[in-house]
């Protein structure tokens, strides 16, 4: 697979989350409320935060990736399942005939930004008892496009069995302390960071207010910042020309967990995840944009090292100067 680390094939990653079919319209800009915009392209892509992250985990190489997802018995499910299997994700599908498979309606601007509306459908039928046995799994990766009680129950089961719990707190919402207490690594963007921390101060101040051992915040074109057991780390973004930012955050999350599962330290894992997320922005679609490990390795080999000036500027932006 071209992974930078030595694979530990006896370990596995479990992703529990959403699986959607994305309906994507490209337009000059994202419409404002009440505005109609004429699009100039339409495609469908397999997506959903959970499924995207599972594909990213699998393509990063190393640990075998499994995914638990709920889907309907309609025509929207097969393309998603085919995409996951093509990425060599081991599927645990909960079939919900009375519900439509989840869908997302995405407008992508010519600048690569997007606006997304999700219809959860069968994703809302995922329940705690659907969780498979956790023996052999090193990490459980969760998001918030499935019911919060299910997310919490899965995190509790993983914690009880010594499995590291990683939560991507997206879409943004206030999280109960009961769930946060079960999380080992929390991944958020700037908006989600404000929601979870309940604070509008600097990145560093918000990170300090979250009682999770490791918190990572993605900062778009700037890069990312992490607080790990009281120590702060920053990683500058890789320079690319964006085509479509859909699934960039999911690619970051999946690659991060894959790297950590293989024994990479947090600094190296952030660099790998940032490179993978950057490459995902250079292609259209969700799972179709997620790079292979060899592509990430190639970008890392060509990238110039971050200068002290660039690192200092990012630390200042985060309130760490």
Image (cartoon, rainbow, N blue to C red):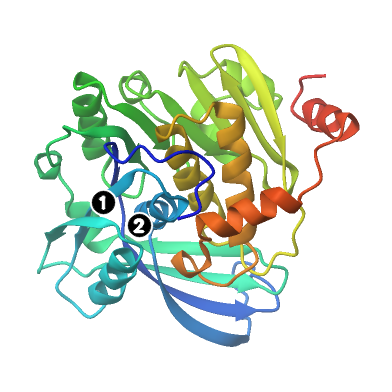
Q: Is residue 219 left or right of residue 154?
A: right
Total numbered labels:
2
Q: Is residue 208 above or below residue 241?
A: above
Residue pushed farthest front?
Answer: 6
Q: CA distance from mark 1 to mark 2?
A: 7 Å
Res 160 → quadrant: top left
Q: Is residue 316 left or right of residue 133?
A: right
As helix, strand or loop, the secondary structure at mark 2 comes to helix
Q: Nearer the viewer, residue 195 or 92?
A: 92
Residue 12 placement (x, y as % from top left): 28, 40
Res 230 → quadrant: top right
- Residue carrying label 1: 67
Asked if one can make out residue 277 in the rendered structure from this viewpoint, the answer is no
Asked if one can make out residue 205 in the rendered structure from this viewpoint, the answer is yes
Q: Is residue 264 above or below residue 302?
A: above
Q: Is residue 172 left or right of residue 80?
A: right
- Residue carrying label 2: 51
Q: Is residue 116 above or below residue 268?
A: below
Crowding at dot 1, Cα within 10 Å, few <14 / some 14-19 / many 20+, comes out as many
Q: Nearer the viewer, residue 2 or 313?
A: 2
x 32%, y 21%: residue: 182
x 65%, y 27%: residue: 200
Residue 164 placement (x, y as % from top left): 33, 26
**Residue 117 tag number:** none
């Amino acid at each position: 697979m071209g992974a930078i680390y030595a694979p530990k094939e006896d370990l596995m990653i479990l992703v529990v989350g959403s699986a959607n079919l994305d309906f994507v319209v490209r337009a000059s800009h994202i419409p404002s409320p009440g505005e109609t915009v004429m699009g100039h392209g339409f495609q469908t892509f397999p997506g959903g935060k959970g499924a995207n992250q599972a594909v990213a985990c699998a393509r990063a190489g190393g640990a075998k990736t499994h995914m638990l997802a709920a889907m309907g018995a309609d025509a929207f499910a097969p393309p998603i399942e085919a995409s996951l299997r093509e990425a060599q994700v081991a599927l645990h599908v909960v079939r919900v005939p009375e519900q439509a498979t989840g869908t997302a309606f995405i407008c992508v601007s010519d600048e690569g930004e997007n606006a997304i509306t999700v219809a959860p459908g069968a994703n809302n039928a995922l329940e705690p008892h659907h969780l498979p046995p956790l023996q052999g799994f090193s990490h459980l990766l969760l998001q918030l496009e499935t019911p919060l009680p299910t997310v919490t129950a899965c995190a509790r089961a993983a914690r009880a069995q010594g499995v590291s719990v990683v939560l991507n707190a997206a879409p943004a919402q206030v999280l109960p302390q009961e769930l946060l207490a079960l999380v080992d690594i929390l991944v958020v963007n700037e908006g989600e960071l404000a929601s979870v921390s309940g604070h509008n101060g600097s990145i560093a101040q918000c990170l300090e207010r979250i009682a999770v051992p490791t918190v990572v915040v993605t900062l778009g074109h700037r890069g990312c910042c992490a607080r790990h057991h009281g120590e702060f780390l920053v990683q500058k973004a890789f320079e690319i020309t964006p085509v479509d930012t859909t699934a960039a955050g999911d690619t970051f999350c999946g690659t991060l967990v894959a790297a950590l599962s293989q024994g990479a330290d947090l600094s190296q894992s952030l660099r790998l995840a940032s490179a993978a997320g950057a490459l995902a922005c250079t292609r259209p679609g969700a799972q179709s944009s997620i790079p292979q490990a060899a592509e990430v390795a190639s970008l890392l080999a060509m990238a110039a090292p971050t200068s002290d000036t660039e690192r200092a500027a990012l630390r200042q932006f985060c309130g760490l100067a």
